[in-house]
Amino acid sequence: MIKVENVSKRYSKIPVIEHIYLTVSRGEIRGLIGNNGAGKTTLIKCITGIYKPDDGSVLYDDEKIYDNPDVKHKVGYVSDNCGYLGRYSVSGMVRLYENYYPNFNKEKFNTLNEEFGLSLKSKVKNLSKGQKMRLGFMLELSKQPEYLILDEPTSGLDPVAKSKFMEILVQEVEKGNIGVLISSHNLGDLEKLCDTITLIEDGKVTNNTNVDDLKEQFVKLQVVIPGGIDSSKLNLPNIVNVSNVGSVYTIIIDNYDKMTEEWLKSKGAELIEVIDMGLEELYVSSQSRKGAEQNEKMA
Amino acid sequence: MINLDFKSDTPIYEQIIEQIKYHVMKGNLEAGTIIPSVRKMALELSITPGTVAKAYQELERQGIIETIRGKGTFIALKIEKKPDEEKVEQISKEFQSKIIELKMMGYDEEHIVELIRNLYREMS
Amino acid sequence: MKKWLKQYGIRYLLFFVTFLLVIVRKTIVELSSLRPHMQVNNNALEWQVYYNIAGLERIRELFIDDYIKIFILGFLALHFLIFMDERNQTEREFLATLPIKKKNVVWYKILIEVMITFLTVSVCALIIYIKADSFLDSVSMQAEWLGQSILGMMITTISYLIMILGAIHLLEALVIKWEYKLIVVGLCAGTVAMFMHTFNSVLETKANSIYHKLYGFFNLLSPSGCEYNVVRYGVHKYGCWEYTMTPVKVIFEGEECWINKYFSATTLNNYEAISNYIWYAVAYVAIAVVLFGVVLAMTKHQELSRRDFYFDSGSIIVGFMIGTMILSFLTAANPEAWTINIIATVIIIVAFVYIFHRKRIIPNK
């Protein structure tokens, strides 16, 4: 199991991430969500052993990863910009992996490449972003890791490639019982893949939950209030977002309960209907509410 | 194979359970047939793996499917058709309210039985 | 070791072969300047012997001067070849994920480079010995001490080069960016060269004995028996570099002949006795061991979240080097205004370090 315990990292005394806790078990897919600048990339680099945490530790099965070859054998990492070594060709990279990773399975790589279709002779620096990502994915899977860290793997992939990617990811995760941490902006994709989610804001963890629990916690209601009502009157603290078309109001609520239902009725709500809401909408609306609050504070 | 109605009152995982049972009953899914894994199903249906896991857990509890580590998830070879007392009671209650509704619309005993018989025949 | 070697072995091999050819060619070219001198008068027997032996002085210069310069350039070229994989941040980060300890990587590099140094210098020493011997034969002379001397020079030069290697690794260990690594090492070499030039032309008479001892130590002069002597004439004090004179025995046409007046021969001969040079060699290696030790210890703290230097001390050291260069400039221009020169240099160093610390950018999150 990956254990990130109280990890902090600072640049010249300015904290980028602080007091991060999260875990990933084998067979679990955990999503990492956060706006740009929230510290996701720094956290991921600490988790993959590229950076050394200033405080706390990153443990894989109770062993630190930083400068520890034994652990690095078990961990696959596909980075956001997948630079690899530009001058090398694809087959050169395969040779490098074969050299450094005893578990590297060349047949597996070739099988995967039949799906992804990269030419062995092309140089890494000449590949497109999507191709580099696919190369990275194949190389890392072929090392048969126990854990996989993916940073924005689907950006740069066209819809067909993305769908293939997710299929193969799911297949490999089940086959190898791999523990995955996947960071992405595409919450729609994460929703279909992840068991658990960690939210990062301003370098701190704000939410660490089960995806389904999160979706149960936040509820989207379609409410009809005949005659309309001033939005500012809908000001319960657990109301995340309100929008309306005419007298049909769409309200997103955190922890919807009987009391809230009664309160809405007291404000004149007649028809209250629970509507399915995706993770993306949930996140965006909760963020926009935060943005609105901050704007109010500043004004 | 599974069609979900996101607007329905029925929770998604229950829809999955129902539809799988339906296919098994209809004979579309024979004993020993392999069905997609939790994650594959989640991808196909565009829902969270947790939801599928919940459905599969219940199906496994009811003995309809079984998972063999390393091999996959299959329709159980022998599905015991044992009546679950609690469930039967719940269904009876539901029947009761449906019967009342039909009666209010003018259906009598024969009509109601006829309706049920036709439905059963359609599904078999 | 095997894994790392598989990846970089070929590069090292190619470099070694090329480098060896370059340096051997240089050696042969230099030694071809050995021309027999023939005098007509009988008095000039001593001179005749002397001139022919004096030509062998070129050997010492090779070991002390030319080889050092070629090796420094060679090390830089070698590191250029090796660092080609680390040209940008993504490549460096990728290499950081490979399952190999940082300390081990440095260790392997050091081992291979020391081996290359040893092999190259040994081969050159052998070639020199063969050529010198055949030259002497051609003028009917024999110098029994030549073999020992060449061995001595070889040992001293190898130790010195290992020390230089340590300094290069230490400087490189401070810097993250590939281009900057080589610039910093070049800067250091330039600084040292400038400083030595200034010392030779201006500061020599002002410096005290410790200074001169250090100068001799780090310039491979002392192992050859060279020392700085202060000679006083009336009010003025001036000094000069002197070599320990020892009589040199040469066998010419079967008969013994002694040369003891001129230093060209004795400098070579000084290397015959092990006690003359061995402690210098030991000192060079000891310094090298300390430098390598520091480099290996630094690997634990090198980490990619910084921008330019792995350590804060990096900018201080570079500032110091730039300051020293500037000091050398100023001193060469105006040696008398010593105090002002120093003050100006210190200001420049402080300004440089300050700018660099402010410049520390927070990398992308």
Image (spheres, coloured by chain):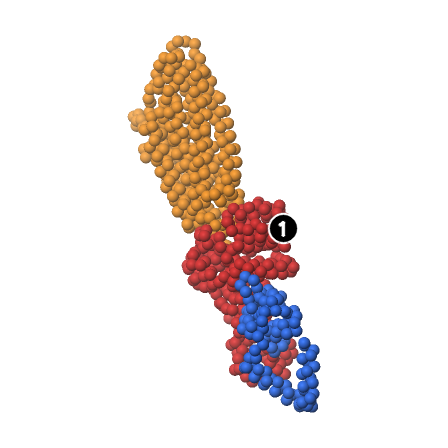
Chain colours: A red, B blue, C orange
With A192 as the anchor, is C321 left or right in this view? left
Q: Nearer the viewer, residue A62 or C154?
A: A62
> From this viewpoint, is residue C161 visible?
yes
Q: Nearer the viewer, residue B94 or C75?
A: B94
- Estimate the x, y position of residue B97 in percent, counting from the top left: 61, 87
Depth check: A171 or C297 in front?
A: A171
Residue C320: % across, % down: 41, 43
Mark 1 lies on a secondary structure that is: loop
The answer to whether residue C305 is seen in the rendering is no
What count of labels does the image hold? 1
Query: Which of B33 and B95 lies nearest the eye of the viewer?
Result: B33
**Percent of width and height locating residue C68:** 44, 32
Q: Residue at x 70, y 81 (%)?
A: B118
| Vertical arrangement, residue B72 with respect to residue A140, above or below | below
Residue at position x 37%, y 41% in the image = C290
Residue sitting at 62 percent across and 81 percent down? A224
Q: What's under tag 1, amino acid-wise?
A: Leu
**Left or right of C49, for residue B61:** right
- The residue carrying mark 1 is A118
**Residue A261 location, x and y as percent?**
55, 82
Q: Is residue B30 left or right of residue C260?
A: right
**Image-based side of A287 in relation to B112, left or right:** left
